[in-house]
Amino acid sequence: MLARRSVLVVDPLDETQEVLRAVLGRKVDVLAARTSAEGLALARHHNPSLVVLDLECDDSSALLLGRFSGACPSGPTPLVLLAGSRRQATGLPDCEIVPKPYHYAPLIRKIEELLGGLLGGTCQPLRKAA
Amino acid sequence: MPSLFVFRGNNQGMRFELDGDMLTIGREAANGIQLHDTEVSRRHAEVRRTGGTFTLTDLASSNGTFVNGQPITVRELANGDQVQVGGTMMLYTCLADESTGDLADKIDIIARQQPGDQSRIVRSIAESEGSHILDPRADDAGSPWLARARSNLQVMYRTALAVSHTLDIDQLLNRIMQLIFEWVEADRGCIMLVNPETSQLDPAVRRNRKGVKSDERIKISKTILDYVMEHNEGVLTSNAREDDRWNPAVSILQMGVCEAICVPMRGRYNMVGLIYIDTSISPQRIIQQQSTTKFSDEHLKLMIAIAHQAALAVEDTRYYSAMVQAERLAAVGQTIATLSHHIKNILQGIRGGSFLIKEGLSQHDENMVRKGWEFVEKNQERISNLVMDMLTFSKEREPELVPADMNEVAADVVELMASRAKDKKVELTFVPAEQIPTLVFDPEGLHRAILNVVTNALDACDRAAVEAAAGDETLLTDSDSDAELRQARPGRVEVRVEYDREGRLARIVVSDNGQGIPEDEIDQVFSLFVSKKGNRGTGLGLPVSQKILTEHGGRIAVGSQVGEGSQFSLELPAVFPEQASPGTSVEGKSAKLA
């Protein structure tokens, strides 16, 4: 039996963790961390399919960004960055940028698209697009 | 560290530290010093470290690079140089000698009894005696030159004093003009300053000798003004037709000025303005003194010296004002950025709550709706607290003093925070003072002060629990991880009210068993916008609490030990109702705490 896919959410806001857990948790495991250091440790340990990282999480989040992508044993992990602005994300590795404050529906759609692609198209979208 | 500080332009208030070997200045983002100025080229100039100094090089920019008003191609920068690129003005600053290291290692203050100290006081003179060296002496009579020199030095000494006492340019110029009138017998005088925007001369100060009609307009020959400004020379005219430095302009003759002195105010960098005085000599006076002149070359020279001093002072004052304004703008910008960040997070929380409510309703999931509503309420509370803290911190509020029960105020806070403590699995206890009289204080203000401290204490316990086992990754993989951690180390917060009858002191002590504050960070806890709570903290709570206690003539004492917890003691003088009268501040009724 295949292990369930997982999404790692690194964000200090309870609300973000809770919303993503409530919606995505039906199909995938949702791991949550409040700091980038905790998140990095979880990424190494649990090999998530996708990482959602708040760039304003703490002082280290931007510095540790490159290590998130290579932290998973199975290879590069797609990153969705929640950034204060697109400018803040200038020069960062190839990843999806979602400027804050964001609406949750588009964010979830973006995550679902990425997860669907990772599953080779065999995975149906978790939710219908609004 | 050497730096370029922007004091004029769109980047006003920004300081660029020259921490590398080479930085480029330009409009593009790739430059180390990016200026938002359309008059600046994409790559305009570069600053390169050469040994212990920095050299500025223009990179063939469209509008050129200027140092102290002069166009440059390559120029070694000196401390205080003003660098202009496009419409942006920057000040270069560096320590005179950065290799001096810690001066404390190089200067010894020897104790009185130490054998190395052989010095003794031979003579002493009071500071006020310093200027007496310039007083006229009896032996000056034999040397008129010496007497004049001493007199001139006295004038310059007083000029230096006059320009050093104010940061108000109008006041400064008035003093200069007053000084000139005390020293020279002028009828009228004025100071004109160059308007930086229009480059035109604007009158700044005007003065008349007593007895001279004050409503009479001063007419100054444009020929004279232009000559002074263009040649950077002072001029004395008593008879324009005899002066060969300019043509016998009609304007001079028409005005009928008998004598005038006009000198440039040349500053460190630019022409700041000019000083003009004039006088007329009556026929009776000419007969009396057997002379047709009042002004001499010596007057002219001294006026030039005074004008230079005044110009330097004007430049310094303008520069200081620009610095203050720039710093103020930077502070406002920083404040707005910080508050925007907090508000953005609160908005994000509200959106999260709203999204869950919407999802819960569509899926008939009551738990999801409830969770969403909790988030909305929590963030409503956060925005409310943020606004109240901002209001409390920003306005010069007087405490609204009324007789009140301190036990009751503290109990209200504990009751309000009980549900949050429960959510965080923190034990929140309240110990009222056994006997405390009704005291006069601002109950609403004190409520906020205690609330902020208790909120921090609960957060400290919450974070302590999470951080205590952060190394155990497996505990952090699901939503129950925090709860498990809290069980491993339950948080405790105690709010205790104390009354010290002898010391006439009331005290609210908030203790927690959180992670504690490192010793070197305790001084920062009351700094504005400094928070160790990440996105959950605004950095306003403790500064607001401190402000409220200070308004009561009190203080907040902090004790903390890392790994053990912290204790915040809110102390305020006990003021009894019979002591206080309406509209009287607390400070007026009780001594402030040391």
Image (cartoon, coloured by chain):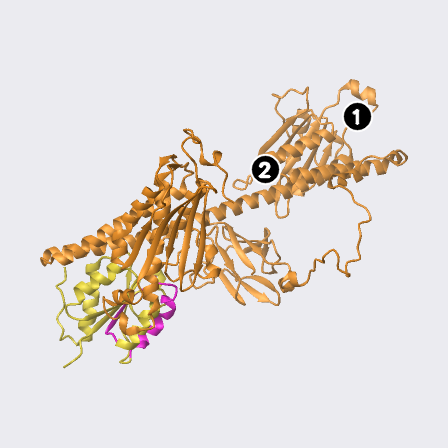
Chain colours: A yellow, B orange
Residue B514 in the figure: left or right of residue B348: right
Quarter holding the N terminus of chain B?
A: bottom right
Are the two marked residues, 2 and 1, in contact with CB atoms closer than 8 angstroms? Answer: no
Q: Which residue is mark 1?
A: B292
Where B276 sits versus B47, above or below? above
Q: What is the three-letter code of the residue carrying label 2?
A: Ile
- The numbered dot on residue B169 is 2
Q: Is residue B23 magenta?
A: no
Q: What is the three-letter code of the residue carrying label 1?
A: Thr
Q: Quadrant of residue B476?
A: bottom left
Q: Quadrant of residue A51?
A: bottom left
The residue lying furthest to the top in this view is B284
**Circle 1 — which element?**
loop
The residue lying furthest to the left in this view is B364
Residue A58 in sight here: yes
**Circle 2 — which element?**
helix
Q: Is residue A70 magenta?
A: yes
Residue A12 in the figure: left or right of residue B523: left
Q: Where does the image place residue B85, in percent across and percent down from the top left?
A: 52, 54
Instruction: Give the extent of the magenta segment.
Output: A47-72
Q: Where does the image place residue B331, in percent across and percent down from the top left?
A: 45, 49
